[in-house]
Image: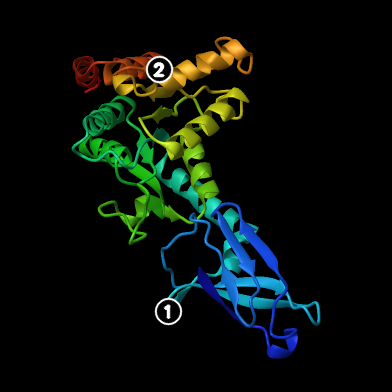
Amino acid sequence: MLQLMRACPLPCMKQHQLNSTRIEDTEMGFSIGCSLGSHVLVRNTGKFPSLCRKERFNLSTMCSEFNKPCKIRVSLCKNEMVDFDERTSPTEIKKEISRCYELVHRLGRGVVYLGSSRMGPDHPHYLQALELGREVANLLNCTSWTGAGPGLMDAATKGALEAGKPVGGFKIAKEAGEWTASNFHSYLPSETYLTCRFFSARKHGLVDAAVRNSCSDRTAVVALPGGIGTLDEMFEILTLIQLQRIGSELPVPFLVMNYDSYYQKLLDFLGDCENWGTVSKGEVASLWKICENNSEALACLAEFYGLPSSGEERHKVSVQIK
């Protein structure tokens, strides 16, 4: 339980009590139940962050005697509060989306990597993702975009940096099941990423980074092995492609990295969906490309953009140009 400190004056309270009310924040999974005398109690659903920030929640409720709104502050931890008015403001979300768009415009569109934040440097998929990030950056010569988090996102970022190519990211406060202690990335320059408060803004940024505005844009979406967050992003982008909101004029390749058959059961399930009639035959297969290894992914991208696929061939082309 978290305790709320009421900020409305005493005359506004009938018998020093608030009417029972319930407030929900759908994006953060926050539920509040109010009553019990001169205090308001909050029931934490388990989704609300334990992260403390130097802001305040200003919740409005109706005072029982005068039927007027009064402000309530939500204390998340000792000495630190969060501003709930700002949290729920559509204007604030629009501002953050605009900042995401500005970052993409400044750094350039490119390859967007989706993937687990939990697979560390000792995991074989981390090494494969690092290699893929390096080779794709060299092949397409574009910006590499990630969620700027740990795990496979970190691997793709480091791979692109090893290739000497630009990187960008949209960081979020919770990764690998833990709330980060800092909003700052451990090694990326601050001008190359944004720390988003809103998942919706982060998704807008990642999608915008992959959209092709001209034939010269070389972009792609690469889904590395991942969990719930990765699946959420994968299927949202897949739906946008299906509905021709992405790639309606200039197609964007969507690669699913099926390392060690990681996604095989998911693919089998989608096959079952076809059998049940909830998905058209061959529909999903036409929207993305399943790659068992990095070589297949590089060959797919090279074919899509009419580029040589091997490092040796790219070297020959570079020599000829010089």
**Residue 254 or residue 69, whichever sits in front:** 69
Query: Which residue sits at x=58%, y=30%?
Result: 240
Q: Looking at the image, is 256 positioned above or below residue 46?
A: above
Checking the image for residue 290, the label placed there is 2
Q: Residues within 10 Å of mark 1 (few under 14, many from 20)?
A: few
Looking at the image, residue 59 sits to the left or right of residue 102; the answer is right
Instruction: Choose top left, top right, bottom left or bottom right for residue 165.
Output: top left
Residue on which the image places disc 1? 79
x, y percentage for residue 58? 60, 73
Q: Is mark 1 on a helix, strand or loop?
A: loop
**Identity, as a three-letter code, of the amino acid under mark 2:** Ile
Q: Is residue 276 above or below residue 53?
A: above
Would residue 246 be visible to someone looking at this image?
no
Residue 309 x/y as whole percent: 28, 15
Residue type at mark 1 is Asn
Instruction: Identify which residue is drawn at 61% across, 61% down.
Output: 88
Specify how the rendered protein is coloured. rainbow
Which residue is rendered at x = 51% and y = 32% of the image?
211
Residue 225: image x %, image y %? 35, 30
Q: Quadrant of residue 7?
A: bottom right
Q: How far apart are marks 1 and 2 (CA)?
A: 50 Å
Q: Give the secondary structure at mark 2.
A: strand
Q: Is 37 situated left or right of 261 in this image? A: right
Crowding at dot 2, Cα within 10 Å, few <14 / some 14-19 / many 20+, comes out as some
